[in-house]
Structure formats: C-alpha cells, structure tokens
Image (cartoon, rainbow, N blue to C red):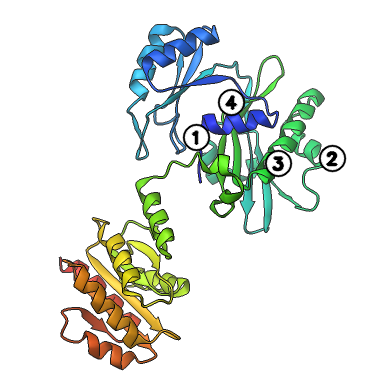
Amino acid sequence: MKIHEYQAKEIFAQYGIPVNSGYLCHNVEDSIKAYEKMDRPTVVVKAQVLSGGRGKAGGVKLAKDEIELRRHTANILGMNIKGYTVDRVLIAQAEDIAAEYYVSYVVDRNTKSTLLMLSKAGGVDIEEVARDTPEKIHKIPIDPFIGVPDYLAREAAFLLFDDIAQVKQTASILQKLYKLFVDTDASLAEINPLILTPEGNIVAIDAKMTFDDNALYRHPKIASLFEPTEEEKKELFAKNKGFSYVNLGGEIGCMVNGAGLAMATMDMIKLYGGNPANFLDIGGSSNPNKVVEAMKLLLSDKNVKVVLINIFGGITRCDDVATGLLEAFRQIDAKIPVVIRLTGTNEKEGRALLAGTGLHVAETMSEATKKAVNLVLAQ
C-alpha cells in the first residue's frame, strides 16, 4: 500500500525526522490561505499522487509570489501524472539547497533483510543514477537482530558527509527512519532528496512510503489512508471472494486453480506469443458461485478477448469442476471464446460433460494455450 508525500511526512515528523512544513490544498483559494499562513516569499507547489516522477511531469513548481502560486496551483490540479489525476497539492516551505542526497530503507529479498541505500547523487535523476552509475549508490544490509546502532549509523552517514556536525544529524535521521520502517511494517521508506542547507542543516524535503499489505491489520490508522485504484479495487474484490487476482494488461484472461499452475500458464501464453491479462488463482474449489464471480471479474476487463480456464484436478475431481463450470455459464452469457483444459482425476468424464457446449476443450496445457493465442490472433 502506498501513501501520499504529505501523509508520509506526517509520520516522519512523529518520529522526529526534520521535514519542511506545508499545507495540503484542494483548490486555488486553499493554496492562497496556506501561502498567507506560511509568511514566506517562496513556496513549492507539489502534486500529490501515488506515483514517482512528479517533478519531470511538471507536477512540482516554485512560486515566488501569489500570482505564480495561483497559476501553478491551477495548472497542476487536474494534471494527469502516470495515470493519476491530481486532485490535491502540497504547498510546502521552499528551502535553499546546497546539495541533494538519497536515503532509503527497503526490503531486499536477495539479502533476506532490510537494505539501507544511500547516495550523494540524490534528486529527480536517481533512477538514471541507479541504471547508469550504480556504483554511486551504497547498499548496507541491516541485521534485524542488531538494527542500526550508533556506530553503523555514523559509518553510513560518513558515506555522504565529511563534516562531523552533518554526520551526527544524518546518523540520527538514519536511526529514526529505521525505527519508523520497522514499527510501521513498511516495505519502503525513502527520502529523495535529503538536503543540506547553506546553514548546514539536514532536512527531508520529500517522503515516500509503502507498506506490507499483510501487516495492515496491525496499523488501522495507516490502513485508513488506503486509496485504491480501480485495479486495486478488483484485487480487493477477488480477495473477499476467496481468490487471488492481479491485473497484467494483456488479452487472455486466465482462471487457474493453484498459484504455481497460474504462473506456468502465464509463461506458456508468453511462450506462444500471447499476453496474459491477469493472474487469477481460484483455489481448489469447484463451487459454481466462485467460478461465476471469477468470470465476472475477468469479463469486467475490456482488454480480455479470450478466457483460458486451466484446471488440474487432484483432490478436486474434473467432472465436479466441469459440472461447476456448466452451472456457472448458465448464469453468465460469455460473449467471448472460452478455452478449457481439464486434467487429473476423472478428466475424461469432465471433458465429456463439456463436449458440444460451444466451449473450446483441450487435453493439454500446450494445446489449450495455443488455442487461446490463436483465437486472439483471429479476431
């Protein structure tokens, strides 16, 4: 789960991390009121969307007076940034910047630990830095039994600064950020940029956080901040119905029983030149109601041109699955081709039940996948 910058900054402030102050605004008049409260000649207008790349998209602007503030706020509100429409902006205190740095904690599956990442090349081009000059990014695995003690925090801070006063400030921020990261079950806590002011102060002027969905039950206040996209709403619907769904944007809708088989099915579709529309694992049940709900979910995706149902009958018998599918299709008028592959216990009986129904029945996964891809190409 992602949250907005202004929400992440509120959490940062609760942990004593220095951030630049600001006000959330939903219209031009709100931004003018915020400007008056801040009593500073220069402020920053920042689009609040759950996406990176705001600066390059024109969603971050400096305003040196009320006229510029009105213009920038009006231009940014309603802007589309990577599929997100801007409906609010943060009017933040502008800071003099002597240098920009990058700091983050992230869950790293390679080291099976939290990873502290630091770089002197912070700012809007950090993605290019990671791609073109990865040696500029320092990576420090954090032992969960040790955390970030004073010596490690100072060692990391010295990678960014030589001045002992700045090292001490940064070390404190690194320790507080790690505590925040662990306490909130975050999967990412990022400051980009962490700035050095001409006065020698270290300030987080941006904040980004994502959280482990499986741990949100422990954090009701954070969970209440969730703003699901349309695709995330579908994933929540699937979860409530007892199956797992992830949209992938292709044309072949997949309904499979078992996560491993679902992943293999998507691989097969790509192998034969198709594009899977989703990952959908309905589990081992042959319950017609579950199939109906899964089909509704697949058919709600306008990109889906063919549905591929791939069922392996282990404990679940294929004839029971076929009966469930037939009952489901009595309730749903699927206007697109449906390919069904049944294998396992009572597979012949299952395929016999589906014969003559207008459904495309296959015996092997390879055969079913080829049929699905060819049906898409024929349209």
Sequence-earlier tag: 1 or 2: 1
Sequence-earlier tag: 1 or 3: 1
For label 3, the crowd category at 10 Å Cα-Cα, with few meaning under 14, some 14 to 19 and many 20 or more, is: many
Q: Amino acid at mark 2?
A: Tyr
Q: CA distance from mark 4 to mark 3?
A: 18 Å
Tell me whether the residue at label 4 lies in contact with that at label 2, contact meaning CB atoms closer than 8 angstroms. no
Sequence-earlier tag: 2 or 3: 2
Rendered view: 363 above or below 73: below
Q: Secondary structure at mark 2?
A: helix
Q: Amino acid at mark 1?
A: His
The answer to whether residue 159 of the structure is visible from this angle is no
Residue furthest to the right in view is 151
- Please give the residue where the numbered disc 4 appears in the rendered image: 205
For label 4, the crowd category at 10 Å Cα-Cα, with few meaning under 14, some 14 to 19 and many 20 or more, is: many
- Please give the residue where the numbered disc 3 appears in the rendered image: 178
Sequence-earlier tag: 4 or 1: 1
17 sits left or right of 371 in the view: right
Residue 325, horizontal then vertical, whole percent? 28, 77
Residue 244, horizontal then vertical, whole percent? 43, 63
Q: Nearer the viewer, residue 107 or 2?
A: 2
- Please give the residue where the numbered disc 2 appears in the rendered image: 151
Q: Secondary structure at mark 4?
A: loop
For label 2, the crowd category at 10 Å Cα-Cα, with few meaning under 14, some 14 to 19 and many 20 or more, is: few
Give the foreground label among 2 and 3: 3
Sequence-earlier tag: 4 or 3: 3
Residue 249, horizontal then vertical, whole percent? 32, 56
Rendered view: 206 above or below 84: above
Residue at left 36%, top 62%? 278
Which label number is shown at residue 23?
none
Could you say which quadrant of the image residue 261 lies in?
A: bottom left
